């Protein structure tokens, strides 16, 4: 089961936009139910950073709400997709003005990590 772009959730949103709230809620619950089952014992968190709150959404979200600087890492692709559209307005020249931060990733995502 994929989470990002899950077809059931995309369909649910279509129903909400059409004004079919009940159908949207039904599809949403089906997604949540499948998610609950599939990720009962599996890691659902897409964040690659070395962080003691990995997968602990409750505390992760609270931390981000508290510091107000940026959103939880799993939300980055959604927001970056929207920013990319806006960035087209200046032919992505913002890329000349910014640099991604150096982040401390978990060992398995470090490019110079020893292979085990
Ligand atoms: S909210 Fe935080 S802990 Fe939950 S999936 Fe997103 S990054 Fe991971």
Image (cartoon, rainbow, N blue to C red):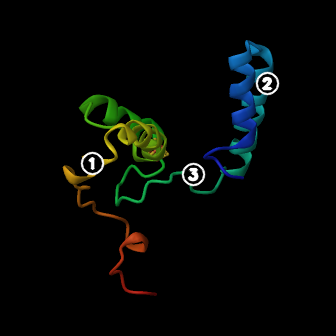
82 on left or right of 62: right
Which residue lies under the disc numbered 2? 26
Q: Is mark 1 within 8 Å of ligand 1?
A: no
Tell me which residue sits at (64%, 44%) in the image: 5
What is the x, y in percent for residue 95?
A: 27, 51
Question: Hey, which quadrant is residue 33 in on the image?
Answer: top right
Badge nearest the viewer, 2 or 3? 2
Using the image, determine if residue 42 lies above or below residue 16. Answer: below
What is the x, y in percent for residue 14?
A: 72, 26
Using the image, determine if residue 20 lies above or below residue 101. Answer: above
Q: Earlier in the sequence, mark 2 or mark 3?
A: 2
Q: Earlier in the sequence, mark 1 or mark 3?
A: 3
Badge nearest the viewer, 1 or 3? 1
Tell me which residue sits at (33%, 29%) in the image: 65
Tell me which residue sits at (50%, 54%) in the image: 46
Which residue lies under the disc numbered 3? 44
Q: Is mark 3 within 8 Å of ligand 1?
A: yes
Using the image, determine if residue 25 lies above or below residue 106. Answer: above
Which residue lies under the disc numbered 1? 93
Q: CA distance from mark 1 to mark 2?
A: 43 Å
Callout 1–callout 3 Cβ contact below 8 Å: no
Q: CA distance from mark 1 to mark 3?
A: 34 Å
Question: Hey, which quadrant is residue 25 in on the image?
Answer: top right
What is the x, y in percent for residue 41?
A: 64, 55
Q: CA distance from mark 2 to mark 3?
A: 22 Å
| Mark 3 Cα shell of 10 Å, populated few (<14), some (14-19), many (≥20) | some
- 40 or 91, which is in the foreground? 91
Q: Earlier in the sequence, mark 1 or mark 2?
A: 2
Secondary structure type for disc 3 = loop
What is the x, y in percent for residue 74?
A: 46, 46
Tell me which residue sits at (43%, 73%) in the image: 108
Secondary structure type for disc 1 = helix
């Amino acid at each position: 089961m994929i989470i990002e772009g899950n077809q059931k959730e995309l369909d649910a949103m279509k129903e909400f936009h059409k004004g079919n709230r009940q159908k949207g809620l039904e599809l949403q619950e089906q997604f949540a139910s499948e998610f609950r089952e599939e990720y009962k014992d599996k890691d659902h968190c897409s964040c690659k950073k070395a962080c003691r709150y990995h997968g602990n959404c409750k505390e992760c979200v609270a931390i981000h709400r508290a510091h107000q600087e940026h959103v939880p890492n799993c939300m980055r692709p959604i927001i970056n997709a929207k920013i990319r559209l806006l960035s087209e307005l200046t032919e992505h020249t913002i890329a000349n003005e910014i640099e991604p931060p150096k982040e401390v990733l978990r060992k398995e995502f470090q490019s110079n990590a020893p292979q085990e």
